[in-house]
Amino acid sequence: MKGNSSDRASEGSGEKLAYCNALLEGALDVIVVTDVEGMFRYLSPSVQRNSGYATGELMGKCRFDFLHPEDVEGVRELYRQVMENPGEARVTEHRFKKKDGEWVCMEGTIRSLVEGGKISEIVINLRNITERKRAEQELRESEERFRQFSEATTEGILFHDGGVIIDANQNLADLRGFTIQEMIGRSVYDFIAPECRDLVRQKINSESQERHVLVGIKKDGTRYEYETAARPAHYKGKKVRVVAVRDITRQKQLDRARTDFVTFASHQLRTPLTAIGGYAELLLSEEDGPLTAEQKKYLEKICHNNDRLVELMGILLNVSAIEMGALIFSPTEVDLKKLIDSIEGDFKIRMKQRAIHFSVRLPEGDSKLFHDQKYLRIVIQNILSNAIKYTPDRGKVELLVALDEDDVIISIIDSGYGIPIGEHEKVFSSRLFRGTNVVERGIEGTGFGLYIVKSLVDKMGGSVWFESEVDVGTTFMIRLPLRFKPQP
Ligand code: ADP
């Protein structure tokens, strides 16, 4: 019965071809039939979309004339193979020249057709993979660029997928003493000191891009310090993390040597300075006989400059310890009242000379903190010293302590020169900040005090801020947890 597909396919060959073409019209794949020499016998309609040629233009031409010269021999070999093995398919990939001269890359299968016991035709099923090839090529090039960058840098680089190393550069291999192949497939944690593994786990989980200093372990078991930062990246088709590793052992050694030297020099200088100050004060007390006004003036200058040198030594020690990350906090129970009394004692003479009115207000009962007493003292001392220094004679300075749940808030309020409003932003952000108003007044200072205060308070788990109005006064406030909380 007509209308049935097999009936229709069995009609005349022209009709048969039209029927096949209609079926293949919308197909993306290309079907080509050639004779055993490669002369085109049939081309499906999609040939036009893929090559730019109308099927009629190619009929009777030889397929090999359109193949890339480098691919001709390979395709001929496949023709030979399929003719020797009738019915068996072979996989092919080759380039075909389009009408506009460009090359398309085709992939597919080749097989021979046997008719009447003889091989009559070769059937080729093809798919255009030009876009895929281009994408693969771009990926290869970008990976190559990545590799060249990673080999050109002096840093170690590794790629990991969820903690499993998938690639690394030679610098990292040299640093760790492993070959690249030995590292691939292993966990990143295998190369990190146990105490740093939790931090790395957190970094990976939170996709952190922050820089950190970690301790690594080499193949021979030696430990080394390194600075590291990671970024997300696409590598070999995967979303991975790329990690840069910079060995800082040498830099740390130099830093340590510098801190040791600064510490040593400061301590060595302190002893004679303390002796000079002591003897000058003894002479000033006139216990060993009266002094002329001139002598007194000179001795006062000696004492003043000696105090400055002692203070500078302290600054030098603290700043170098902060910069080196060498602050070691040893918290103990601190009686805040006693500590404040003792700090007040240090400033008593200065405040008396300048007729500064000083008062302290503490909360009822005990004010016990658990902190490093030495650093807590430096913080309060610095803020109080500024309040006195930047308040005119006969001014007022007040120290207020308040408790707020698990925190203590220490406020130091003065009636001094204040900080110009336009300079407030710089107070904690620039290390050597000095207010223009106090510089104009010729008041000595280094600009290091608040940097030390902020660094210490941060490390103690607290915060420091201020309010200030020129020629009205300044209040510095420090909030600290009652118990020291180590900070990263
Ligand atoms: P220094 O006092 O040695 O200059 P600091 O870092 O302690 O260094 O202070 C930085 C600057 O902040 C000071 O030079 C001053 O301009 C300003 N400052 C700090 N405390 C006060 C204050 N209580 N009153 C007015 N200005 C202040």
Image: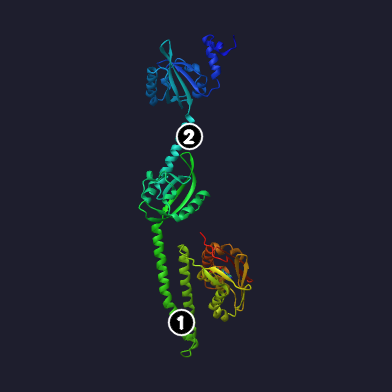
Going by the numbered disc 1, the residue's amino acid type is Gly
Query: Where is mark 1, residue-wise?
Result: 278
Looking at the rendered image, the quarter that the N terminus falls into is top right
| Residue 38 horizontal/vertical position (percent) | 41, 17
The answer to whether residue 303 is visible is yes
Report the image quarter containing ligand 1: bottom right
Q: Give the quadrant of residue 381.
A: bottom right
Left or right of 298: which side holds 218?
left
| Residue 447 horizontal/vertical position (percent) | 52, 68
Closest to the observer, 400 or 37: 400
For ligand 1, tell me if the residue under mark 2 lies within 8 Å: no
Mark 2 neighbour class, 10 Å CA radius: few under 14, some 14 to 19, many 20 or more:
few
| Residue 443 horizontal/vertical position (percent) | 54, 73
Seen as rendered, the residue at the extreme bottom is 289
Q: In this view, does 419 lie above or below 282?
A: above
Left or right of 482: which side holds 68?
left
Residue drawn where x is 59% and y is 74% of the image: 391
Label 1 sits on a secondary structure element that is helix
Label 2 sits on a secondary structure element that is helix
Closest to the observer, 230 or 190: 190
How far separated are the C-alphas under marks 2 and 1? Answer: 80 Å
Going by the numbered disc 2, the residue's amino acid type is Ala
Closest to the observer, 469 or 200: 200
Tell whether label 1 touches label 2 (CB within 8 Å): no
The answer to whether residue 468 is visible is no
Query: Where is mark 2, residue-wise?
Result: 135
